[in-house]
Image (cartoon, rainbow, N blue to C red):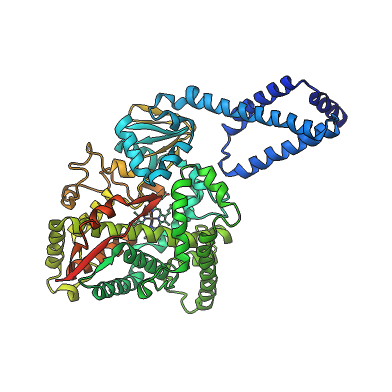
Amino acid sequence: MTRAFYDAFSTALQASWELSALVSLLAGVASHHLIFRPFEIDGYAWQILFIFLGSVFIFVTAYIQLAGYGVMLALCRVSLIATAYSSGAAISIFMYRAFFHPLNRFPGPFLAKISRFYAMNNAAKNIKAFEDIRSLHKKYGDIVRVGPRELSINRPSAISVIYEPPTRTTRSPWYAQVSNDVTKISLNSTRVLKVHKLRKKVWERGLSFRALAVYAPRIQAKVDLLLSKLANHCGRPIDMTEYAMFFGFDVMGDIGFSKDFHMLELESEHLAIKGVHESMLAIGVLGTVPWLLSMISKVPGAAASFSRFTTWCHRELQKKREIVASEAAALKDQDPRDIISWLLKALNEGDPSAPPGEIAIQEDARLLIIAGSDTTSAALSNALYYLASNPKSYQRLQAAIKEEFPGGINDWTYDRNVPYLDYVIQETLRLKPSVPGGLPRVTPPQGLMIDDDFIPGDTVVAVPTYTVQRDARFWSDADAFKPERWENLSTEKSPWIPFTRGQWACPGRNLAMMELRMALSHIALRYSISFAHADASKSFDSGVMDTFTLTLPPLHLIFTPL
Ligand code: HEM
C-alpha cells in the first residue's frame, strides 16, 4: 500500500507542467466546495496557512528527492502548483459568491457580496460601521446583503424571529474569536444554546434586584464622588466623556470585584483600562472580518496592551478566591458582595451554572468589567449631551425629579420612580445605543421566514440596532431627542433593542439603569448644564466611533450650581 502510494506520487510528480497546473487549479476549486464552504473555518486561519506552507515544503522536497529536480526548478514547479491551487480556490469563491450564492437575490453592494473586506475598508475609513449600514439600508431597502453570507435586516418583525425565544438562530462565528471550547470562553463568547442558558443563570443571580440592593450604597458612593468632581470644576469646562468613563469603570471595579480602580479619585485612567481602550480601535476595524481578528489576536505581542488588563483581572480573581475561601464560613448565610463572588460561590458549590473551568471564569472576570463599563459610561455621556442640547427636556427632567423629591438632594431615594428620567435614558439609548451594530446570529439549516422573505439556512443575520432605532417608518421625528414619546410607547413592543432581546440579552440592564438613574437625578437636582464652547456639541456628535461599543470623543460641558 505504502509502496503503491509512493509509486503513484512519484509518477504524479513527473506529470507535465500543464497537467500539474490544471490538477492544482481543480484541487483549489474542490477545497472551496468540500472544506471552506461547508465547515466553519474562521478560527483556523493559522492552521490553514501552516498546512499550506507545510504542503509547499513537502512538494519542494519531493520534487528534489523523488523526481530528481534541482532546487530552483523544484521551487518554480511548486510555485506554479501553489499559484494554480490558490487561483482555483479564489476563482471558485468569487464565482460562487457573485453568481451562485443563495443570497444573490438580496440587494447590496457588489463588493460586499465578494468579501467582508468591503466592510473592513469602510470601517477603516471612518470607524462608523453603524452609519455605513444605515446608508446601505437607505439605498437598498430592508434586507441588504452586507457580506458574502451576511444579511442586515432592518425590520421590527425580524427582532423576534432572530433574537427572541423560541428562535433557532445561534451566535455567529464572530463570537468564536477566542475559542469554541466552552470551558475556555466567557458567557458572551458561548455559542452553544444549552451551555449558554445554564451559565447565564449565575449571572442573573449576581445581577438580580436582590444583589443590586447590596451594591446600591457603593454605587451611590461613586455618584457622590463624581458629583464632588463636578463641584471642583464648577463653572469651568469638564470633559464628561472622561469622567463618565472613570465613573463606569470605578463602579464595575467595586461591584464586580470589590476593588477600586480609583479613577475618579485620581482623575486619571488606570493602566489596565488604558490597555482595553487602546485595543478598541483594532476591534472596531478588524472585527468586521472575524477570522482576521482571531488570527491577529493569536500573534504573540499583538494584544500586548489588552494583556495588561488580562493580568489585572487574573490577579484580582486570584486574590478574590483567597478572600472568598477565608470568609466562606463567616459569610455562609449572606449573599456575595460582588459579581465575581457570585460566580466563585457557584463554582465552589459545584452549581451546574458556574463557569465550566478555570479559563472560563478568568474570561468571565474580564467580561464583567468590559461589558458593564464603557456601555454605561457612553450612555451617561450621551444622555448629558442630549440634555445639554435640549434645555427644555432638561428643565422638564429637573421639574419631574423635584416634584418627586421636594426636599432636593437630601430627600432623594432610589426606590421612587420618576418616569421622565427613564424616558430620557430610553431615548438616549434609542438615538445612540452603546452597542450600535447588529448582533450577528446564524439561521438554522432549514432557514427561516421574516414576513414573506425566506432567509436560507446558515446565513449570518442581524437587525442593525442604530438603523432600526432611527427609522422614520417606526419613529416619528426619528432623529430628534424626544423623551416624551415614551409616555405612549413600550420598550418591549417598539423596535428598541439597545440591550438586545431573548436568551442573549444583557443581564446588566437593571444595574445600568440604576447607575444612570442615580447619576442623572443627582446631577439634575444640583446643576444646570451647557456646552463649554460653540463647537462642543457638533464635535461630540460627529466624532463618535463604532468600536463594537461606542467610543466617544471629548464632551466639554459646564456645570453651574442651581
Ligand atoms: C447602558 C448599558 C448597557 C448596554 C447598552 C448593554 C448592552 C448589551 C448588549 C447589546 C449585549 C449583547 C451583546 C452580544 O450579544 O454580543 C450585552 C451583553 C452583556 N452585558 Fe450588557 N449592556 C449594558 C450594561 C451592562 C452592565 C452594567 C453589565 C454588568 C456586568 C452588563 C453585562 C453584560 C453581560 C455579562 C453580557 C453578556 C450576556 C450574554 O452573553 O448572554 N451590561 N449588553
Name the residue rendered at 41%, 62% in the picture: 205
Name the residue rendered at 68%, 37% in the picture: 52
Query: In the rendered view of the protein, which quadrant contains the N terminus?
Result: top right
Q: Position of residue 379 (x, y in %)?
A: 30, 57
Q: Position of residue 241 (x, y in %)?
A: 32, 61
Q: Quadrant of residue 246?
A: bottom left
Decide if residue 53 is on the left or right side of residue 39.
right
In the image, is residue 138 above or below residue 43?
above
Name the residue furthest right.
Answer: 3
Name the residue rendered at 34%, 73% in the picture: 218
In the image, is residue 433 above or below residue 145?
below
Decide if residue 501 is on the left or right side of residue 94.
left
Decide if residue 299 is on the left or right side of residue 159.
right
- The one nearer the camera, 310 or 328, is 310
Name the residue rendered at 48%, 64% in the picture: 343
Q: Quadrant of residue 107?
A: top left
Name the residue furthest front.
Answer: 72
